[in-house]
Each structure stands twice: as structure tokens, then as C-alpha cells.
């Protein structure tokens, strides 16, 4: 029926749960009660003033949120002000304007990071990589998802995903990804997908969680390679051990904090 289709495709056939009233695919399983308008604007939430080096320059990272693509993905641009270095996280479809904005500073893009390889998080990856020429990092266990991303999108009603090639490098928990003079710590948070990663900035007190943890919700675990037990373990052991005032930047929807989720998340 489709190139490469087989048993795997059956598991990706949209279920009632993954279709909204319009018949469009909705995100891989999170349901959040906030109004759409909340998600439409672009936020800049730099926290750079909190940490200053001896020479007076900021050491912290800034993070910009861009809500892009049919599933309203949060695409994050992390920047390190002292050097101007950047990292792009989860380039979704619909990132043409963002890409134009980034192109003049393409040589400063240290990496394109993937929290995981569900099609909505990699919809713009091929184009971003081609034009920014930055290395792509993700966990090795996401490879099958990445290699089928375009087809999974098609099955869930999102056409036009340029199939990305394999990443430049696999990232594992505990390593640091350099962004200028600062870095992001890689946390392994699988469960929503087999090789889900979160990226933690100690200096700025934020963590990018992909679809593992959302505002008062968690990622769905009814897709191939998912495991509810693993997801809850990841959240409890990797995310809930971060300081309570850590700001959570999820793959969809509004930011939250570790402290808020510990008390208000009904799944935990
Ligand atoms: Zn996902
Ligand atoms: Zn997603």
C-alpha cells in the first residue's frame, strides 16, 4: 500500500483516541484543558540574569519557544548569550520562518537535539539539518521511529514530512551537550518512546522534557515501543529528583514546574 508498509503500520493506524472531531490526528496522547490561544504566542523566557560569571557575563542559557506544526509542537531554541551559541530542539513542520531567522547565525548552531523521533518532533528536521548544517543528536533507541517518521506522519494524517536521514551521533544519559560556554545535561526519560531524552540546564533551572511530562499530564503510552511503567519510572527518578523550581518545557502545551507536577499531576 505504501512503500515499506507492513505489520508496523497496523500499529500506527489512527485509533479513535488519536483522532479528534475533525478527523485530524492529534498529538500522541496528551489531553490538556487550556485554551488554544494560550499556545499560539511566542514566548521568550530568558533567565540569564540569575547567574553571572566573575567577569560579569551571563553564564545561563536562554530559551525561546516556537509553537509550530499541525500538532502544535513546542520547538525550542536554546541560546548561550556570552558566545551566541544555539541549540535547536525538536524541529517540527512549519518552521520556515524560524529557519530564516536562524540562517544568518547558522554557524553558531551547535546542535539539533531530538527529545524523541515521533514524526511531529522531526517534521522539519531534514530541512533544518540541510540548511543549518548542524549535527543531529538523539538516543539510539529512537532510530526505528526516525527512519519511519514520514510514513508514521502519513498514517496519522500529517503529510509532507521530508524523511530525515539518520542522526550524526547518538546521545546517552549523563553526557553534556555543549552550548557555547554552558551545557545541557542529557537525562534518559524513556517510556513515551523507547529512547526519550530530556535536556536539563542546571545553570538556568529548566528541563526540556519532550512528550514525557506535560503540564498536569504525561505522554501517551499506547504506541509501539512505549511503556507506562518505564514512563512513570523516568518521571519519578529522573525528573522529580530535579529541584522543585525547575521550569519544565514540554513538547506540547504550556510550561510548568517540577514542584507543581509533583503535587498536581493526576498521573503520578
Ligand atoms: Zn511523542
Ligand atoms: Zn509530540
Image: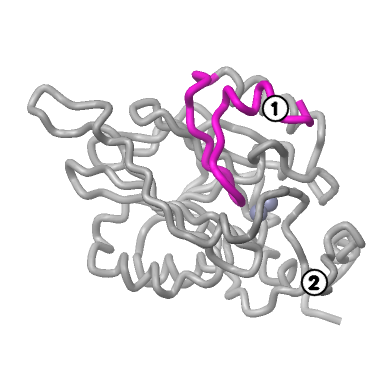
Residue at 40 percent of width and 35 percent of height = 184
Q: Where is residue 90 in the image (x, y as percent from the top left)?
A: 52, 55
Residue toward you, 105 or 256: 256
What are the residue bounds of the magenta stretch? 242-268
Corner quadrant of residue 215: top right
Would you say 190 lies left or right of 61 here?
right
Residue at 67 percent of width and 28 percent of height = 234
| Residue that mark 2 sits on | 155
Callout 1 crowding tier (Cα within 10 Å): few <14, some 14–19, many ≥20: few
Would you say 59 lies left or right of 55 here?
right
Would you say 138 lies left or right of 217 here?
left
Callout 2 crowding tier (Cα within 10 Å): few <14, some 14–19, many ≥20: some
Q: Position of residue 143 (x, y in %)?
A: 64, 53
Q: Quadrant of the N terminus?
A: bottom right
| Residue that mark 1 sits on | 264
Q: Is residue 107 magenta?
A: no
Q: Where is residue 250 in the image (x, y as percent from the top left)?
A: 57, 44
Q: Does the magenta stretch include residue 266?
A: yes
Residue at 61 percent of width and 74 percent of height = 161
Corner quadrant of residue 148: bottom right
Mark 2 residue element: helix
Q: Where is residue 212 in the image (x, y as percent from the top left)?
A: 66, 39
Would you say 168 lies left or right of 256 here?
left
Residue at 58 percent of width and 22 percent of height = 259
* First along the sequence among labels 2 and 1: 2
Residue toward you, 43 or 109: 43
Mark 1 residue element: helix
Amino acid at each position: 500500500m505504501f512503500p515499506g508498509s507492513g505489520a508496523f503500520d497496523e500499529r500506527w493506524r489512527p485509533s479513535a483516541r488519536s483522532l479528534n472531531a475533525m478527523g485530524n490526528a492529534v498529538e500522541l496522547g496528551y489531553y490538556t484543558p487550556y485554551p488554544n490561544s494560550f499556545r499560539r504566542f511566542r514566548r521568550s523566557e530568558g533567565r540569564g540574569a540569575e547567574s553571572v560569571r566573575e567577569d560579569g557575563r551571563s553564564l545561563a542559557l536562554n530559551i525561546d519557544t516556537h509553537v509550530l506544526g499541525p500538532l502544535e509542537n513546542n520547538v525550542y531554541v536554546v541560546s548561550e548569550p556570552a558566545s551566541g551559541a544555539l541549540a535547536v530542539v525538536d524541529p517540527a513542520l512549519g518552521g520556515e520562518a524560524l529557519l530564516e531567522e536562524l540562517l544568518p547565525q547558522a554557524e553558531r548552531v551547535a546542535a539539533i537535539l531530538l527529545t524523541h523521533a515521533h514524526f511531529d518532533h522531526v517534521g522539519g528536521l531534514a530541512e533544518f539539518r540541510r540548511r543549518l548544517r548542524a549535527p543531529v543528536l538523539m538516543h539510539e533507541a529512537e532510530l526505528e521511529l526516525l527512519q519511519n517518521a514520514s510514513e508514521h506522519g502519513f498514517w496519522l494524517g500529517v503529510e509532507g514530512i521530508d524523511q530525515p536521514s539518520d542522526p550524526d551521533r547518538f546521545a546517552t544519559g549523563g553526557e553534556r551537550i555543549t552550548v557555547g560556554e554552558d551545557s545541557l545535561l542529557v537525562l534518559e526519560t524513556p517510556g513515551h518512546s523507547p529512547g526519550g531524552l530530556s535536556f536539563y540546564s542546571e545553570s538556568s533551572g529548566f528541563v526540556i522534557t519532550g512528550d514525557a511530562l506535560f503540564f498536569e499530564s504525561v505522554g501517551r503510552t499506547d504506541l509501539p515501543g512505549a511503556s507506562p511503567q518505564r514512563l512513570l519510572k523516568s518521571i519519578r527518578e529522573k525528573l522529580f529528583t530535579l529541584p522543585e523550581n525547575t521550569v519544565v518545557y514540554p513538547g506540547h502545551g504550556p510550561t510548568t514546574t517540577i514542584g507543581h507536577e509533583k503535587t498536581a499531576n493526576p498521573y503520578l
